[in-house]
Image (spheres, coloured by chain):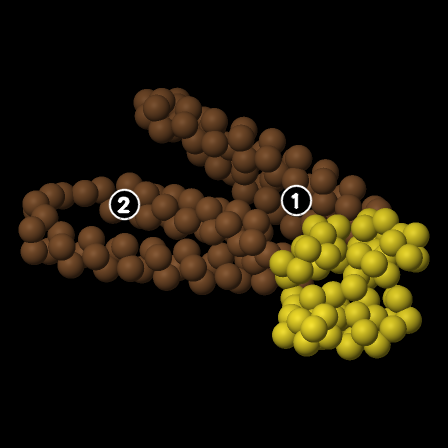
Chain colours: A brown, B yellow
């Protein structure tokens, strides 16, 4: 990972950290603590990943080679396709039989994003096992 | 697609990591190639054939061709 890219990632994490602390002070402690926990987890994962990548680069091994890109491409396509199908089915059946409810759009977007990421991680793992 | 990658690598007394470094790919890619799970791009196939000093056809074979040869 290049140094500017690493800096940007840690800067974004620090920025979200400030928002998390502000939320805790402001009274939304559940949201703030959750956010803070997420940041700590992300920072640790990012640190481990970049150390592994640096180790590989030092050895002269290309960490992001053609196989990785192919797996990432296949995982992206599969997760997008499954996500679109699931959403379409929910919209279709929900419009006919589902109850009319009010939802917080930010929560809904967050859930959609989490589902998409989970699908991507699952498919990435699947394709890296078979390829 | 079948290949003789493992055979040639062992003949050249190279580890999977050595080959990965020379071919500028990850060790996992070499493992997948040797197991026949992954088909390389033409660029990688060319690089590997250059490393072992053989032609692409000598290194990689279609499964049907291999079966015909074995018959």
Q: Secondary structure at mark 1?
A: helix
Subunit under mark 1: A
For the point 83% across and 58% down, the residue is B7
Q: In front here: A128 or A21?
A: A128
Q: Is residue A125 left or right of residue A116?
A: right
Q: In front here: A14 or B22?
A: B22
Q: Is residue A22 left or right of residue A64?
A: left
How much space separates mark 2 and mark 1, taking CA atoms?
A: 30 Å
Quadrant position of the N terminus of chain B in the picture: bottom right
Question: Which mark identifies residue A7?
Answer: 1
Image quadrant where residue A35 sits: top left
In percent of width and height, residue A84 lies at 31, 60
Q: In front here: B4 or B68?
A: B68
Check the image and report above or below for A92 versus A5: below
In percent of width and height, residue B16 lies at 81, 50
Quadrant position of the C terminus of chain B in the picture: bottom right
Question: Which mark identifies residue A108?
Answer: 2
For the point 26% across and 55% down, the residue is A87
Q: Secondary structure at mark 2?
A: helix
In percent of width and height, residue A88 lies at 23, 59
């Amino acid at each position: 990972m290049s140094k500017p890219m690493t800096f940007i990632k840690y800067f974004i994490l620090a920025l979200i950290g400030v928002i998390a602390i502000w939320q805790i002070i402001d009274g939304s402690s559940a949201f703030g603590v959750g956010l803070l926990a997420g940041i700590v987890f992300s920072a640790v994962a990012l640190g481990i990943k970049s150390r592994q990548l640096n180790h590989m680069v030092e050895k002269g091994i290309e960490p992001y080679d053609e196989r990785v890109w192919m797996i990432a491409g296949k995982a992206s396509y599969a997760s997008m396709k499954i996500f679109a199908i699931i959403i379409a089915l929910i919209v279709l059946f929900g419009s006919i039989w589902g109850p009319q409810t009010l939802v917080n759009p930010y929560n809904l977007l967050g859930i959609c994003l989490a589902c998409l990421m989970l699908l991507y991680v699952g498919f990435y793992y699947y394709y890296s096992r078979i390829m | 697609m079948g290949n003789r990658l493992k055979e040639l690598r062992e003949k050249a007394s190279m580890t999977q990591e050595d080959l990965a470094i020379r071919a500028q790919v990850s060790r996992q890619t070499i493992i997948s190639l040797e197991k026949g799970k992954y088909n390389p791009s033409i660029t990688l196939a060319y690089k590997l054939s250059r490393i072992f000093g053989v032609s692409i056809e000598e290194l990689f074979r279609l499964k049907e061709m291999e079966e015909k040869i074995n018959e």
